[in-house]
Amino acid sequence: MTRHGELGAALHRWRDRIASTGAGLPGDGAGGPGMGRAELARLTGLSVDHITRLEQGRATMPSSQVLASLARALDLDDAERRHLFLLAGHAPPATDLVPRRVPPSVRRLLDGLAGAAVGVHDATWSLIAWNPLWAALLGDPAPAVASPCRNVAWRHFTAAPSRVTRTPEQAARFETALVGDLRAAAARYPTDGELRSLVAGLRRSSTRFAELWTSRYTGSHEGEWVTVRHPDVGAVAVDCDVITVPGCDLRIIAQSARPGTPDAEALGRLGALSAGVLGRPGALGAYAPPVPVAETGHAFGDGRGQEPVRAGS
């Protein structure tokens, strides 16, 4: 259902914030310091009357094509574009590619999690950033230059070596949530080649994944504890929390130990070692985006030449 008044107010607000470049265009009576209605009409191919009726809440539900033209002309970001479509009564359009950038605001947030092993994943569950404690606890992901080696779903369903152990019940919940996440990502990013390749490779390589994918089961990530079997400090029990960042579609795994336990002491020793590498614990200096499949020559489902990463999830 169209929210005419809110749609009109939003269009006017977005138009007003853009400096006018339409010198010489006839006045349109819109007022305000920003882009005039005549200029917006020229950029979108709509009539001034149509834009006026949209802003005054008198127009019927605009088409998705009209909304797309308005979004381009008004230079809306992804969140604003989504808001525009929702106000007009349309389902938000899917974006083309999975976001694989960690915004500065998220980096600052994660810098404060000095006592936790932190790994940042994109919507496909590929590891794109980590702090030194993550590498110290779970194994350095840096040698795994090919994207499949850094993907949580790929490693889990192909039984790649991992320091993390789960109970059968935990594993079942984790698998259902992972597949549900990938199914939702495939709907949001239908043209992302790396995501399509991942899903196709998993369906070929894992009977369990194929079963879950076709069953349409859904699940959600919940806080859990897992055991990390470290070669130097032994078994470390950690609380594993998944934080979702909606605006950039990231999943953050934060692993921490309960204070006053031997696990916390072990994690502290690993933290001291990691601080010696980068100078301060928790510093997100290990940011390293995965190398695209095309650049490595590897594809999901082709394990030739890949060194299994031993970083669990």
Image (tube, rainbow, N blue to C red):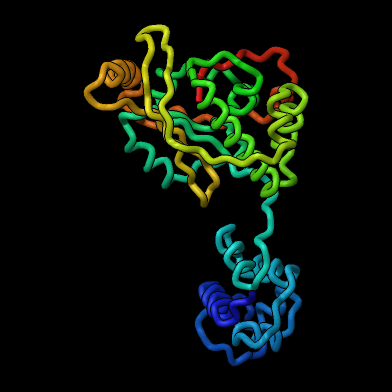
What residue is drawn where x is 37% and y is 7%?
232
Against 52, residue 85 (above or below) is above
Q: Is residue 65 left or right of residue 35?
A: right
Q: Nearer the viewer, residue 252 or 74?
A: 252
Against 169, residue 139 (above or below) is above
Q: Is residue 272 left or right of residue 97?
A: left
The quadrant holding residue 293 is: top right
Horizontal and vertical percent position of residue 57 = 61, 85
Determine the residue located farthest toward the front in the rendered image.
169
Q: Is residue 228 left or right of residue 246?
A: left
What residue is drawn where x is 53% and y is 16%?
162
What residue is drawn where x is 38% and y is 38%?
110
The quadrant holding residue 28 is: bottom right
Horizontal and vertical percent position of residue 76 = 59, 64
Q: Taking the image as drawn, is residue 246 in sight? A: yes
What residue is drawn where x is 70% and y is 82%?
60
Horizontal and vertical percent position of residue 68 = 70, 66
